[in-house]
Image (tube, rainbow, N blue to C red):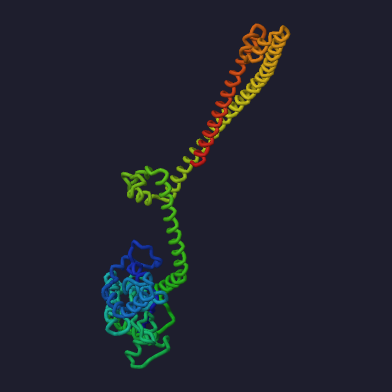
Amino acid sequence: MKITATLNIANQSFSGVKKHVEHDKKINHSNKSIDYEKTQFNQTKEILNSDDLNKIKKERYQDQFEKYNASQKKSRHISKMFKNVNEFVKSKEKTNSFDKTGVATFGNKQNQDELLDGKSPDEVKNILIAESKGMAEYADHFNERHQFIKVARYTTNVDESTPHIHMQMIPLGRTAKGKPSMSLNAALKAEYQYQTGSSITDTRKALSWFREQEDNALVSSVSKELGKDYSLTRTNEHVQDFDAYKKIKERLDDKTEENKRQAKILKFHETEMSKSKDRAIEFIARHQPTHKVPISAKVQEPHEVQTAQGFKEHKMTSASYLFQSAMEIVQKYAKLTVEKIKKWEKSLQDRQKQLDKREQEISQREKNLKQVEKSLNERQTRLNEYEKGIDQYKEKLVGKAVEIGNFEQAKKTNNTSMSSLSKLAKDKLGPLTEIYNEQQRSRESAERYANQLKKREQEREMEEYRRQQERGGR
C-alpha cells in the first residue's frame, strides 16, 4: 500500500510553538480540528535536556565567546562583553535560531479516514496508540541516524485530522571557514558528506536527499507498529493540519519585524512612563512629604511618600493617580499663591494710602513752616525798626545833653549799651523788646522741629525701602 510522508523544517525556535503542539486546553488554538478526547494518546519526550543543550553551545561556541570578550576588553568596550556562552549564542540568533522546528507528517486526511472508518472505539484507540508509538520510535532513533542534526524534544499529535510529529531540531554544521554555524543548510551539507563521502553545494538536492531518507524512516516505523505494509509515495497533496501549521508560521514570520518594532515602541513608552511616574512622585514628596496612597489590597498600611517604603507604594500605583495627586497639589499652591498676591496687593494699597497721608501731612507742615517763616520775617522787620528807634532815641538823648552843655552826660549816654538804653526806653518801646525775644525763641524752636520732622521722614523712607527689598528677595 502506498502512503505519503513529508518532513518540513522551519527556521523557528521550538520554544515558540512548544505549548501549542502539546495541545493544552488552557491555550486558545487556531487549529479547530483538535479532538481533545484523543489528546491522551499524544506523546512528549525530552531527548536532550537543557544541560545537554548548554553543553553543545559550550563545545561549539566557547572559543568564539572567549575571543570576542578578549577583543572587547582590549578595546575597552566592557559594556559589549557577554556574561556567558548562552548570551553570546543568543546574540547570534538574528538570522538563524539555534534550534529549528521540524514537522513530519504520516499520510493525509484521506488515509486517516480510511484507516479509522468502521472501527470500534477500542480499535480506534489501538490505531492511534500505534501511530503515536511509531512516530515516537522514529524520533527516538533519529540521533542514531544523523551526526550533524539532532532531535532534542518531540511531541506526537494523533488528535488531529492527520497524524504528525513536532520536533525540536539542532543543526550542527560549520561554515566554509570551519566556524560553528546555526544554518540548516550547512548541517545538511555536512550530513550528506558524512554519509555519502561526497561533498555537495546544491542545498536543495541536499534537502531532497535528507527528506527521502527521513520520510522512508517514518513510514517504516509507523507501518511496523500498525502491522501494515506501507511504502512511500510522492504526491502533490498536503495535509490540512500541516497546511494550517505552515500558514500560522508564515503569519508569524510576516509579523516578526512588526512585533519587534511594536515591542521596541512599547518598551520606550514603558520607560518614559516610569520616568514620568518618578518625577511625579518626587514632586509630591517635595511639596507634600506626608502624602500617602489609598488603602488597597496590596497596601494595607500606607506610608508617607518621603519614606523609602512610601516611595515604593507610590511607584506601584497607576500613573493617572500620581498625576492627579500632583495636579491637586499644584492647584492648592496656585490658590495659596493667588491669596498671597491679593494680600500683598492690599498691603501695598494700604501702604500707599499711608504714604499719601504722610505726604499730605508733610505738605501741610511745609505750609505751616512757610507761614511761620513769614511771621518771623515780619517780626524781624519790626525788630529792625525797634533797633532803629533805639538808635534814634540814643541820638536824641546825646543831642539834648549837648544842647544844655552837659558833655559829660552826652559822652556817658553815647557809651551806654543797647540793653541799658532799652531799659531807659522801656516805657516807650518795652513791648517791642518782649516781642523780639519771643520771636527769637519761636524761630529757634521752629527750626529744631522742622529738622526733627525731616529726619523722621528720612528714617521712615529708608525702613520702607528695606522692607520692599526683603519682599522682593522672597
Q: Name the quadrant of the N terminus.
A: bottom left
Q: Is residue 422 left or right of residue 195?
A: right
Do we see residue 105 in this rendering? no
Residue 343 at x, y = what percent? 52, 33
Residue 293 at x, y = what percent? 37, 45
Q: Is residue 157 above or below residue 301?
A: below
Q: Nearer the viewer, residue 210 or 110?
A: 210
Do we see residue 264 in this rendering? yes
Among the 4 quarters of the image, the one containing residue 82: bottom left
Q: Is residue 7 left or right of residue 419?
A: left
Residue 252 at x, y = what percent? 43, 70
Among the 4 quarters of the image, the one containing residue 204: bottom left
Q: Nearer the viewer, residue 151 or 201?
A: 201
Q: Is residue 196 above or below residue 284?
A: below
Residue 315 at x, y = what percent? 38, 51
Q: Is residue 200 above or below residue 278?
A: below
Q: Nearer the viewer, residue 272 or 136?
A: 272
